[in-house]
Amino acid sequence: MKSKLTKLKGTARQLSVEIPKETVDQTFDEVLEGIRKEAKIPGFRPGKAPIDIVKKNYAKDAEDELHKRLIPQAYENALAEHQINPLSYPELSDINLSDAGVFTFTARVDVYPEVKVKNYKKLKVSTTKIDVSDKEADEVLTRIRNMHADFNPTDRPLEKGDFGICDVDTTMDGKAISKKRENMWIEVDKEASMMGIGEELLGLKKGDKKDIEATLPENYPDKNYAGKKAEFHVEVKETREKKVPDLGDEFAKKIGKENMDEAKSEVKTQLIEQKESDAKGEMKNQILEQLLRNDSTELPESMVKRQLKVLTERAEADLAKKGVDAESIESHKKELQDQLTKEAENKVKIYFILGEVADRENLAVSDEEVDSWIKSLAANYNKTFEEVKKYYQEHDLVGGLVEQLREEKALDFLLEEAEVAVKK
């Protein structure tokens, strides 16, 4: 067997492989003999038909089986010969069996890039002093109070603060621009409703209909309609009055606390924990930005393409959820292409950078850490640990989870090593 290695753009490599006639003939004879043992050819018992007839009747099957036997082993031999550590499955092309009986093919594959992470310790990051005011705690308690509100049906016209349960059609120049929204809750308040149309429901009763004109925001998902006037055809199906509980010790007991002082203290603790988590996330983002800025790693094209596909599909799903039609989604995808491509490249870069840091610092993920993560996930989805672990094992997701946890460890390490400036 002969093979030639050609370096392509980035981390791509091409292997040109040639398998000699002797090997091809021997393998082809073995293939035909295997087929003859099972072949059902009229006039012959299994295993007794002449090879020429078997070859004629099962030519396509024989060719496919020849490829299956020759290519994988020759590919592995070529990898070993040129000391290549592939990162992706090979893209095969130019598969050919010449008249002279020589079998050739090419395999394009990405290899692991050379990652050069420099000066990754003592990176400078900044954060702000964490504090929680009484006002912030009161705002959270007000939101919790609103979550425990009752919404009682009424027969009177809608007043400010009430809710109308409505069916809404949105059109522009008489043409529907999104799917009809049914049983949509709209608060009768300009500031609390989409594009302020809630204020227009003031005084309406159950069964009333009203056409409301409003300007769509500049960040509307479908750029064809952003910033333009649309008509909202609203039908009030039900009217509800919002009743919130009084903010006192009785309410505190309702949410499992002895009194409002205890409730407020716990809210402050939770707010501090959330702010600390947010601050930690922001500092990690600063670290990643610095690492990306100083990185010149050649990226495997196949990985970038896979990541871009994931991001594009996610963007499509988000737009579809917002009611954007298929034609507009395609247009939006084209506008987002450069942004999504850059994001895909950065995600792949981060994968290799954090992997290199983890390698250098000997950061490993234990079985106990994997089980701990799975237990947390199981609790969030009200599943048992055994159920979730079995799912991860059956779907070959454990390896990906270990990589994810290892990346997080590397990022935690970088933050521990960073120089943090705290601003007031």
Image: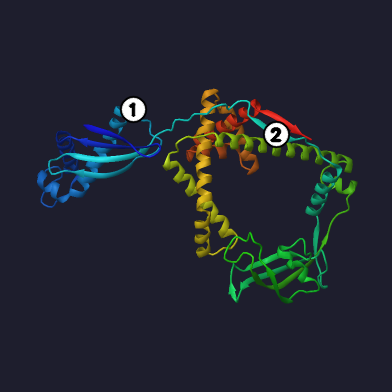
Q: Position of residue 348 (x, y in %)?
A: 50, 39
Figure quadrant of residue 127: top right
In the image, taking residue 90 as reference, residue 364 lies left or right, namely: right
The structure residue drawn at horizontal position 49% and vertical position 57%, both measured from the top left corner, is 334
Figure quadrant of residue 3: top left
Give the crowd class for mark 2: few <14, some 14-19, many >=20 residues within 10 Å. some
Give, as a three-letter code, the residue at label 2. Ser
Distance of mark 1 from mark 2, alpha carbons?
44 Å
Secondary element type, mark 2: strand
User: Is residue 398 at least partly visible in the picture?
Assistant: no
In the image, taking residue 130 as reference, residue 89 lies left or right, namely: left
Give, as a three-letter code, the residue at label 1. Gln
Whichever of labels 1 and 2 marks the residue nearer the N terminus, that label is 1
The structure residue drawn at horizontal position 38% and vertical position 30%, both measured from the top left corner, is 85
The structure residue drawn at horizontal position 50% and vertical position 42%, both measured from the top left corner, is 345
Give the crowd class for mark 1: few <14, some 14-19, many >=20 residues within 10 Å. few
Q: Position of residue 77 (x, y in %)?
A: 28, 30
Residue that numbered label 1 is attached to: 83
In the image, taking residue 85 as reference, residue 328 lies left or right, namely: right
Q: Position of residue 372 (x, y in %)?
A: 61, 32
In the image, taking residue 368 as reference, residue 242 lies left or right, namely: right
Secondary element type, mark 1: loop
**Above or below: residue 365 compared with residue 214:** above
Q: How many marks are shown on the rendered structure?
A: 2
Residue that numbered label 2 is attached to: 126
Q: Nearer the viewer, residue 22 or 388?
A: 22
Mark 1 vs mark 2: in front: 2
Q: Nearer the viewer, residue 208 or 251?
A: 208
